[in-house]
Image (cartoon, grey):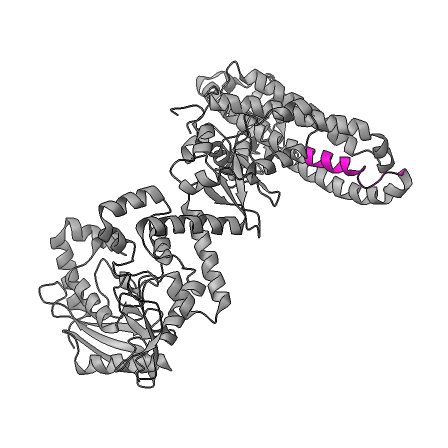
Amino acid sequence: MDSDDDFLSDVSSAGDFLDTQNSDDESLGDDFGDDLDTGFSDDKDLIKQKRKPYEVEFKVLNPLDIQREQDVQVDDVSAILGLPPESAAILLRFGRWKQEKLIEGYMEHPEETLEDAGLGTNFEGLAKTEKVADFMCEICCEEGPDLETFAMRCGHRFCVDCYRHYLAQKIKEEGEAARIECPGDNCHRIVDSKSLELLLADNNALQERYRTLLTRTYVDDKDNLRWCPAPNCEYAVDCAVKARDLRRIVPTVNCICKHEFCFGCSLNDHQPTPCTLVKMWLKKCEDDSETANWISANTKECPRCMSTIEKNGGCNHMTCRKCKHEFCWMCMGLWSEHGTSWYNCNRYEEKSGSDARSAQAKSRASLERYLHYYNRYANHEQSAKLDKDLYLKTEKKMTSLQSQSGLSWIEVQFLDTASQALQQCRQTLKWTYAFAFYLARNNLTEIFEDNQKDLEMAVESLSEMFEKPVPELAKLKVDILDKTAYCNKRRVILLSDTAENLKNGEWAFNVEW
Amino acid sequence: MGSQKRIAKELSELVESPPAGISVELADEANLYEWKVHMKGPEGSPYQGGVFLLKLSLPTAYPFKPPTVSFATKIYHPNVTNDEKGSMCLGMLRADEWKPSSKISAVLQFARQLLAEPMPDDAIEGRIAEQYRNDRQRYDEVAREWTRKHAAHQ
């Protein structure tokens, strides 16, 4: 990484996209980001900091915003190059919306650029359907002077029915919109939105689908935009963090739909662990071979009945529970042949035996290390689910409790706040274990582990309060509020510390990534 | 049906003035959508002297969807699957490259051209493509041998 904070400064200057520059002043994203955070924490001094080290600047765009962004660029390019808007749109889509580069290319080679974009250089004439003498449609082979026909400026004329059928198939079946070509053989002219609207004037559903597909392409084409991955969510997030920044930052963003996800990889929030390590970790956990490895390192088969046996400590004299076979754990030989030296297998001292043993120990140590982190990771994942279930049950009871305890609806909201904090903290804790697994020890790891421990203790004690019977919960309100604030604070500290070190390249890792 | 009119027109044009080395007929007189194509191996290619039977199927959505072409006669060629199906990969027959105004005649001529000049970079049989590139002589021998064995004129 060449510059330590270029992903922060990049945001306001927004690289090469004019539109992002123009719309940066819109307050939507900023206000929104702050709103969400205050929802979780009352801790004044932490909230005061404008942006914490682990936070990135972003804004959420609704479908209208996305449409507007496109329109602004289309109008700009249309005005600058003197092209009709529908042609400017095709040009922009061809150039993946990199406006400056596109205009530069156009200025240098106008005709080639237009040709490559599928526009052609002829912009005369209005798009209209008409009847033409001596016409036969090349697609359906129908002919006659009454046949309504259409051709774009490339002049390839087909009957309106075939044209419509063609467009419908492209849009509906192939999901194509930005690059629908003229139906003419070998013609690469792109069907513009004006022609399309004319032909599909009586099919609003199809036009709607067409526009949706175009918007999808727009977001997919732009590096600074990413769809919110939540089901049925229509929002996109605008963030300037680039792929190359992902070694130094974990760009978690919050959608208006409340979904919290990583702008780098679209997965659920995984701070403090960088995207690449997350992928490695998930792959590792998914791999059942780890389980198999554990079994192979920790168990052996009874030489007689082949039952899998785990040695649970103690001496080498094994008695199979199933078949009562007695054997030596070390050499797998009959125990009776070991004579009186029951505590020591002769072969144990042999070089080959000791080599095998140290290899096994090494493999076991690495597995135990993995399992240490995995178990804690999985435990927080599981506990987060349990906490949530518990909260949902509690919520129901709280509703009935409102009348008994005299607490208003507003007043019982502290449980909601606490529950959300628990979820979020457990999510963070979960990923700290994946992070720690890949962390090579240096003087910073101890601080990290302390932070991790502090957050974990705070979370467990808040979680415990949640398990109290409902009538007691009302009495615990102040304690729960305090503990919630404390959890949030510990989380902020842990994430800030980790993010700072990541940004400055202070962490050492035990893997290449 | 528009598609039948179009197919009938293409068929009659192909029967009346067939492209070089190609003849077409319906597999079943009652069905416009299944064609039998006889293709002569191009001169100067190892397929010379052979007559290959191809099956051409038109989808009901033709000409908005592309036809499919396969070799019923076994052929040793990098762009034809070396199995019972004899499937071909022709760029122009891919859904996103096919245009409703593309013609069957062009497809068949393209297929025959492929016999004269295989496209190893677009191969469906990597091993044969490899041989075509690195050991042309051996490729020619095998292709000629297969032509003699499977496509000899009856």
Using the image, determine if residue A301 lies above or below residue B19: above
Residue extending farthest right: A404
User: Front-most of A2 and A104?
Assistant: A104
Residue at left 40%, top 51%? A75
A211 displayed left or right of A112: right
Q: Can you say which quadrant of the picture contains the N terminus of chain A? A: top left
The answer to whether one can see residue A286 in this image is: yes
Which quarter of the rendered picture does the C terminus of chain A lie within?
A: top left
- Foreground pick, A235 / B151: A235
Residue A13 placement (x, y as % from top left): 43, 33
At 37% from the left and 51% from the top, the residue drawn is A93
Residue at (49, 29) in percent of width and height:
A249
First to last magenta residue range: A406-421
**Residue A436 screen position, x and y as percent:** 54, 25
The residue sitting at 29% across, 54% down in the picture is A117
Query: Is B20 part of what is drawn in magenta?
Result: no
The percent position of residue A169, horizontal first and vertical second, equals 41, 67
Q: Quadrant of residue A452?
A: top right
Residue A448: give x, y in percent of width and height: 57, 20
Q: Is residue B57 visible?
A: no
